[in-house]
Image (cartoon, rainbow, N blue to C red):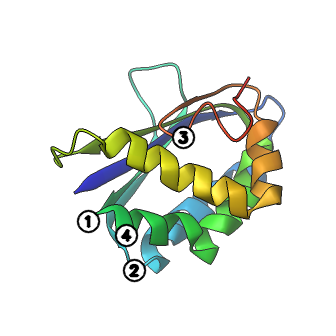
Amino acid sequence: MIVHGNRFTFKPGTSAAEIEEALESLRNQGRSIPAVRSFTVGRDYGGEYEWGATFVLDDLDGYWEYLTHPAHMRTDRIGLPLLDTFASFDITDDLDPEMAAKIAALHQRRYDQDAELTELVSNLPDYTGSAAPGPHGGK
């Protein structure tokens, strides 16, 4: 099992309507992507981020389905331009010592197939985590 998560803070000046649209798009991912077993979208407490989301996936095949599903792609287009800080992480009970590299390879494969996403991620002011440093080595 893999728990994929995101922690983020919106840019100053982002409207309440823009924030709610981005959060609802994340919720829609959880409801509409078949590979997602459960999800949480809400406030992030105990750290430097304002919001967070987690998605529980069975395996790497499910992770790929999640990454490439139209609902996830929609969230990328809506949400990434609004973010000031963004961190992704993955927690797994799979003991494969190559799991981190396999997850990073899925993200790189997606960057290689999606120039618009590559640009959005490359333009994030602050991005860390499981898919970082991003398609061009990050910032």
Amino acid type of the residue that numbered disc 3 sits on in the rendered structure: Ala
Residue on which disc 1 sits = 58
Q: Are marks 4 and 3 in contact (CB under 8 Å)?
A: no
Real-space Cα distance between discs 4 and 3? 16 Å
Where the N terminus falls, by quadrant? bottom left
- Whether label 3 touches label 2, CB < 8 Å: no
Do labels 2 and 4 touch, CB within 8 Å?
Answer: no
Give the labeled residue for mark 4: 61
Q: What element carries label 2?
A: loop
Q: What element carries label 4?
A: helix
Q: Are marks 4 and 1 in contact (CB under 8 Å)?
A: yes
User: Crowdedness of circle 3 by 10 Å Cα count: few (<14), some, many (20+)?
Assistant: many
Q: Rounded to the nearest whole Å, what is the CA distance between mark 2 and mark 4?
A: 12 Å
Is label 1 in a helix, a strand or a loop? loop
Mark 2 vs mark 4: in front: 4
Disc number for residue 131: 3
Tell me where residue 23 appears, x and y as whole percent: 59, 55
Marked residue nearer the N-terminal end (2 or 4): 2
Name which residue type carries label 4: Asp
Which callout, 4 or 3, points at the residue further toward the start of the chain?
4
Residue in view at x 76 percent, y 49 percent: 118
Q: Which of marks 1 and 2 is nearer the N terminus?
A: 2
Do residues under tags 1 and 3 come within 8 Å of each other at their CB atoms? no
Residue 50 placement: quadrant:
top right
Q: Where is residue 77 in the image (x, y as percent from the top left)?
A: 76, 59
Real-space Cα separation, disc 3 to disc 2, in angstroms: 22 Å
